[in-house]
Structure formats: C-alpha cells, structure tokens
Amino acid sequence: MTNEVVEYLGKEYLKVYVSSPPDDGKANGELKKLLASRFGIARSKVQILSGEKSRYKKIELAK
C-alpha cells in the first residue's frame, strides 16, 4: 500500500491511506507529511486536533 489521498468526501472530509503502522505515532507522522505535501504547506502547519489514536481524525491545516 502506498501513501495517498484517495478520495474527497464532501468539502471537509478526505479518505487517506498511509503505509506506516500506528505504533509510536508513525502513522500520524506519515499522515502529516502526506497532507503537508498534498496542500503545499510545511509539516509543522498540520495539526491533529482530535483522534490521535483513532482512524478518524480532525485535522487543522494552517497557512
């Protein structure tokens, strides 16, 4: 499996796949990296607001 944003589900939702395991926050780090790249922002501008240990997360992208 590759890291990719596969589908926009409405205006505020994305379906994303990451290949890293959820151990020690690796998947969250990969998610931040992927979203930062996708939206052309620094990785530090991607914040997980809720769902740190869940499949469903609330993310904030700052400019």
Image (cartoon, rainbow, N blue to C red):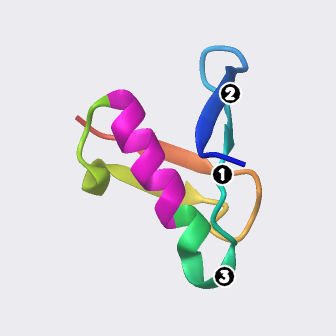
Please state the horizontal and vertical placement of residue 56, each as a whole percent of the image: 74, 51
* Residue that numbered label 1 is attached to: 57
> In the displayed structure, does residue 54 sit left or right of residue 5?
right
Q: Is residue 9 above or below residue 36?
A: above
Query: Magenta segment: does it hold 37?
Result: yes
Q: Where, quadrant-wise, is the C terminus in this rendering?
A: top left
Foreground mark, 2 or 1, reads: 2
Residue 4 lies, in percent from the top left, at 60, 37
Q: Amino acid at mark 3?
A: Asp
Q: Name the residue at 23% across, 46% down.
A: 42
The type of residue carrying mark 1 is Lys
In this view of the protein, which residue sits in the foreground, 59 or 20?
20
Q: Position of residue 3 (x, y in %)?
A: 59, 45
Q: Is residue 48 left or right of residue 21?
A: left
Front residue (pair 1, 57): 1
**Mark 3, secondary structure of its residue:** helix
Q: Which residue is mark 2?
A: 6
Report the Cα–Cα distance between label 2 and label 1. 16 Å
Q: Residue at x 56, y 76 (%)?
A: 25
N-terminal-most mark, 3 or 1: 3
- Whether the magenta-drawn stretch holds residue 20 is answered as no
* Residue, disc 3: 23
- Please name the amino acid that badge 2 sits on: Val
Identify the secondary structure beneath mark 1.
loop
Tag 2 near tag 1, CB within 8 Å = no
Q: Magenta part of the protein: which range? A: 29-39
CA gap, disc 3 to disc 2? Answer: 23 Å
